[in-house]
Image (spheres, rainbow, N blue to C red):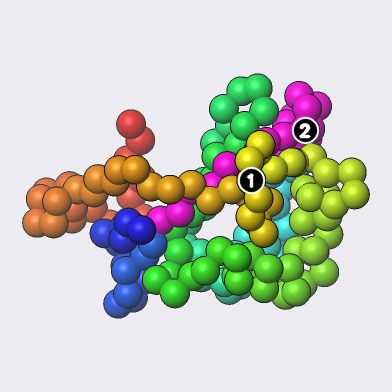
Amino acid sequence: MHHVGSTNGGGRLKRFGFVIQAKSAAAMERYKELHKNVPEEISGPDGALAAIGLHRMSILCWPPYTLFMLVEADENFDPARDFGRALKMHPAVQAWDDVMHGPDPLLQPVAGNDTDLQWFRLEEAYAWDVPPGSERASLTEDENVEA
């Protein structure tokens, strides 16, 4: 597990990658549309994602149907435990999950995913961070640098 250079007020953050697939092109479009307005109970400053220890989440699309999620979380974050714990925090979180993974889901596990998580946790093959002490390492967390 790669520890990210940024901190959460003393502890280091861990980085996780996950993958899943949309069931169809229409499901992918609905998924992207829904994510333009994620409920505050999930993504707000006091929402479930923050409460379970996430600091950052980014979901990228690989057409036609694959989604890749990158998460940076507290050092004690455990995906199997904490994503499940989030579902119990507010009815809006469970309702959101039901749309994504429920009886008529937008998403489906990737082939070969025999884990308890819908999103398959990826093994990190390589990681790089700006070396400590370099000029770029002094950027604040509030600054965004795009490639």
Q: CA distance from mark 2 to mark 1?
A: 15 Å
Tag 1: amino acid: Asn
Q: Quadrant of residue 36?
A: top right
Q: Which residue is found at the position 74% from the left and 41% from the top?
A: 108
Q: Is residue 83 magenta?
A: no
Tag 2: amino acid: Lys
Q: Which residue is mark 1?
A: 113
Q: Quadrant of residue 133?
A: bottom left
- In the displayed structure, 18 sits above or below 90; it is above
Q: Is residue 27 magenta?
A: yes
Q: Which residue is found at the position 52% from the left and 69% from the top?
A: 78
- Image position, residue 39 (x, y; %): 73, 58
The tag on residue 23 is 2
- Image position, residue 113 (x, y; %): 64, 45
Q: Quadrant of the C terminus?
A: top left
Q: Which residue is found at the position 26% from the left and 59% from the top?
A: 5
- Image position, residue 138 (x, y; %): 18, 55
Along the horizontal axis of the image, is 113 left or right of 57? right
Q: Quadrant of the N terminus?
A: bottom left
Span shown in magenta: 15-33
Q: Which residue is found at the position 67% from the left and 28% from the top?
A: 65
First-in-chain label (2 vs 1): 2
